[in-house]
Structures are given as structure tokens and as C-alpha cells.
Amino acid sequence: MPTARLTLDPAFRVGSVDRRLFGSFVEHMGRCVHTGIYEPGHPAADEDGFRTDVLDLVRELGVTVVRYPGGNFVSNYRWEDGVGPREDRPRRLDLAWRSVESNAFGLNEFMAWAAKAGVEPMMAVNLGTRGPAEALDLLEYANYPSGTTLSDLRRSHGVAEPHDIRMWCLGNELDGPWQMGHKTAHEYGRVAAETARAMKRFDPTLELVACGSSNAHIDTFASWEATVLEHTYDFVDHLSLHAYYDPGDGDVDSFLASGAEMDRMITSITATADHVGAKLRNKKKIKLSFDEWNVWYQSRFGGEDSLDWRTAPELIEDVYDVTDAVVVGSLLITLLRHADRVGAACQAQLANVIAPVLTRPGGPAWRQTIFHPFARTAQYARGTVLRVEPDSPVVETAKYGEVPALWSVATYDEESGDVVLFAVNRGRDEEPLRLTADLRAFPGARVVEHAVLHDTDTSAVNTAEQPDRVRPREGAGTKTDDGTLTVELPPVSWHMIRLATR
Ligand code: AHR
């Protein structure tokens, strides 16, 4: 049987697990907001119109921070449209998704929802069709206590206390020609720097995110980041990364190795940011905010121009299978492996739109396959990330060359004493991969849980009728013996192995 070996040791420290790694994203797109998290009149809706069945799933998912309101949507959004009496709110065309936005849900509804979900907001401002003035108005409306026109306007809207939003995204994907208000790196760098400078004058403790590239394949990848940071380095704390992995071309081995591409992207952008820091003789380290990532069958999407003007249409409601869930698990492993530099990450999106949660209008909500690795990782990856450098058989891929079949990371929670190993077998050979882990640095460690996501039918999915067709099961035969953990990883499988050391 092919075997992979690794060593777990508390001395191999990468960094602390930032809880913001388990973020998500709510965009006014398709049915993410309307009939996703918000549906007045639904049997499970609360007094605010929020679906409590979805709220329950969001809490179970373990989401910590949620980016809002876009996405491409934010680049033609007027935040003022979404506040104040509902009957006065305008219906507007959203040019990003060729949709009609009712504005029944806006900033104050989102903040009320976030409080109920127990998540931190990550608010994006429009630097596409708008600029610093409107961003500063939003900041004053949201965060200033009272005594100015905008803060008193918020109070007159029934929100007495300031929202105190800490994390702000300076626009969205402005490198992309599809973006309303698309800009060159110099144009964006200047406007982002001036917006950030003013926002920090308002409150120097705000955390600001400058837009990085919208994907790693765009021509300006990395040079965009270098130029933008040359303008913004002094004023921003994070730089965004976005990446979607498309299973659509049938190259399953490369798709299973998507973590290799995410890994390379993080390494490249870290180097780019540090290069600019060195050039500017600035000792500050820019953190990365991987604030859009997921599996997305992009090849099935006909593009924005193919859409009709509709309100809350069904848009990119991808149904995820077992392979997709394994890839999502491997992407979370990749993010954890870079815990020293990735300070936040948001799976895109939360409900219906390429999401872990699907809903039917007036009907049920259920967990997609990708829900499970996210929920377990968010729940159990705590404390310190431990580097693991496995000696593993390799898989040959068309896109990334040879990649290790075993993709893994571990965390060590000093408080509870728990060590958790997250592992994926990216191989597709019938024979399982045997993994042995040297535990001598954790004397007495014993297995308390082994959750496995695997199915002999890798195309199995969850549906409203069969919502639990795919879910983690307890692994068999996993044991520790004389300081060694032994476990078998079937092909295309995700694992969480929890060890107690006390
Ligand atoms: O998440 C869907 C879209 O993908 C977002 O609106 C945009 O930022 C990205 O291109």
C-alpha cells in the first residue's frame, strides 16, 4: 500500500489560527440575500424577515466574518438606497448582474443579521462608480456615534449605537474589465490611497483591505498588486486575493490539486507585498485577505450579458459533489498552511450563489457537501498551526506537474491540548493511501475522533429530498501505537483526525 509519513511537533509553528480565516460572503447577487438569508413571509422568518433555518445553518457552519454587500455588485451600489423607511427605498438596476435590486435589505438589516448570526462584518465600499466622498459618508453614517447629519440620520433610522465596523474593503476587483468603474492599477492605487488616508483620519484603528487581482490568470497579476501597494502601503493593512477553481474541464487530477495553485498564489503575492515593503523601507507586513475563494463551475455560467433583468434570479446555484467537497477541504488546508500571512478569508458565497447552504423560496434550507469540511475545520482548527512536511507519493497533473497525493496541516490548541490533523488524499488510485504520523512530541496522544468525507460515488450530492446523502462519517481502524498514528485514506477523501494529548 502506498504510504505517506509526517511528523507532528509543537516546535514546527507556522502562526496562530486567526478566526477570520473562516469567513464567508453575502453579495446582493442572485438569491444570496433575497430568499437566501432574507425572506419575509417564509414560515421560518423571524420578526426582521431573516430565515432562522438559514441562521441556524450559518451558526453551525462556524462562519466568523462576513463580507458585504459585494462583489461586483458594490461597484455600482449606492449605500443610501438601502437605509431608511423601506417604502421610500428606490428600486435600482444592478448593472453587475443585470438584476433589479429592491433595496429592501441594506446596511442596517445586514448588521442586525450579522449580530444574530454572531459574525463580524467586513464592509466593502464602492470605488467603482463612486469615490472617497461616498465611502466617508458611509463610514460616518455607520461608525460615528451622534451629533452629525449622517450619524443622526442613522439614529433616526432606529440604530442608536454606532455599528463600529472594523474591517473595510476599498472596492472590489477593480482590475477586471467587467467591473463597473474598472481602473488601471495607478488609477485605483491613487483613489484607494486617498480613501484610506481619509478613513484612517476618521479612525486610525480601522483595518483596510486594498484590492489585489481578481484572479491569478489575469495579465496584470502581481504587477497590479505591486503598483497598488506602492500607492497604498502606508494606509492599508491587508491586500485581497480572489480565486475560484472550476471542475468543469474534466481534468479531475488538476482540479483535485487546486490547493497547489492557491498555495502558489499566496506565496507569489506575499513576495510581491514584501518586495514593495522593502522598496519603501517600510517594516510593516501586509496581511492577505483571501476574501473570495471557492469551487465554481464557471464554465457553466453564460456571463453577465446573457442575463435578463430580474429580481433575485437563480444565479450560479452550483450543486457540489464529493470531489468538490474534498477540494474545499484542501483549500482550507492551504489557507491554514499560510496562517502567518493570511489574516482573513471568505468562502464565496454563503447562500444559494456558489454556496454551502441552498434554500428554496418558501421551502427548506440544506447543507451542500462543501458545508462539512468547512464546518469541521472552523470548529476544530484552533490555537497554533503546525507545519507538516509529509513524505508522500505524488500525483501527476496536467496543470501543476507533480503534486503530493497527501495535502495536510495540523493545529495544536494549547488550552485544550487537542492536536488536529487535517488531511486530503488527492490520489484517485483504488488503493488507499496509508498515513503514518510520528507523535513522539505528544506523548500519550490518542484518537478521539476521525471524521471522513468520502464516497465511492464521487459525484454524489445533497438535495432537498436527500439533504444528508453526503456527510462526514467516522473513520475505521485509525489508531495510535507507540507514538505513531496510523490511518488509511481512501482515494479522493478529506479527513479530520482529532487527538487528545491530556
Ligand atoms: O462571487 C461572485 C463574483 O465573483 C463576485 O461578485 C466578484 O467579486 C467575483 O468575480
Image (tube, helix red, strand yellow):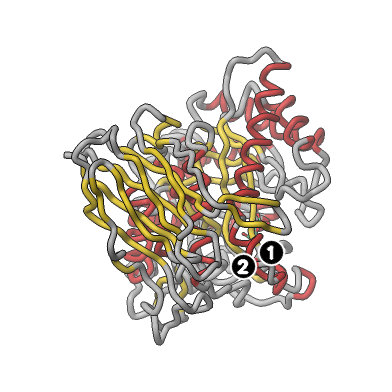
> Residue, x 70% and y 28% (percent of image)?
229
Q: Does the image show residue 87? A: no
Q: Does the image show residue 437? A: yes
Split into 4 quadrants, where in the image is the N terminus?
A: bottom left
Residue 95 appears left or right of 362: right
Residue 310 appears left or right of 36: right
Residue 247 rendering spot, x and y as whole percentages: 64, 67
Q: Distance between the residues labelled 2 and 1?
A: 6 Å
Using the image, determine if residue 25 lies above or below residue 138. Answer: below
Residue beneath disc 2 = 101
Q: In which quarter of the image is residue 327?
A: bottom right
Q: Residue furthest front?
A: 1
Disc 2 residue crowd, few under 14, some 14–19, many 20+, Cα 10 Å: many
At numbered mark 1, what does the secondary structure look like: helix, strand or loop? strand
Q: Which amino acid does label 1 sit on?
A: Asp
Residue beneath disc 1 = 94
Judging depth in this view, the residue of 365 and 194 nearest the camera is 365
Using the image, determine if residue 134 lies above or below residue 13. Answer: below
Say whether mark 1 is within 8 Å of ligand 1. no
Please state the total of marks drawn on the protein image. Answer: 2
- In terms of image quarters, where does ligand 1 lie? bottom right
Tell me which label, 2 or 1, sits earlier in the chain.
Answer: 1
Residue 280 rendering spot, x and y as whole percentages: 71, 16
The reply to whether dot 2 and dot 1 touch (C-beta < 8 Å) is yes
Split into 4 quadrants, where in the image is the C terminus?
A: top left
Q: Which residue lies furthest to the top in this view?
A: 281
> Residue, x 70% and y 49% (percent of image)?
214
Judging depth in this view, the residue of 309 and 21 nearest the camera is 21
Judging depth in this view, the residue of 271 and 298 nearest the camera is 271
Q: Which amino acid does label 2 sit on?
A: Glu
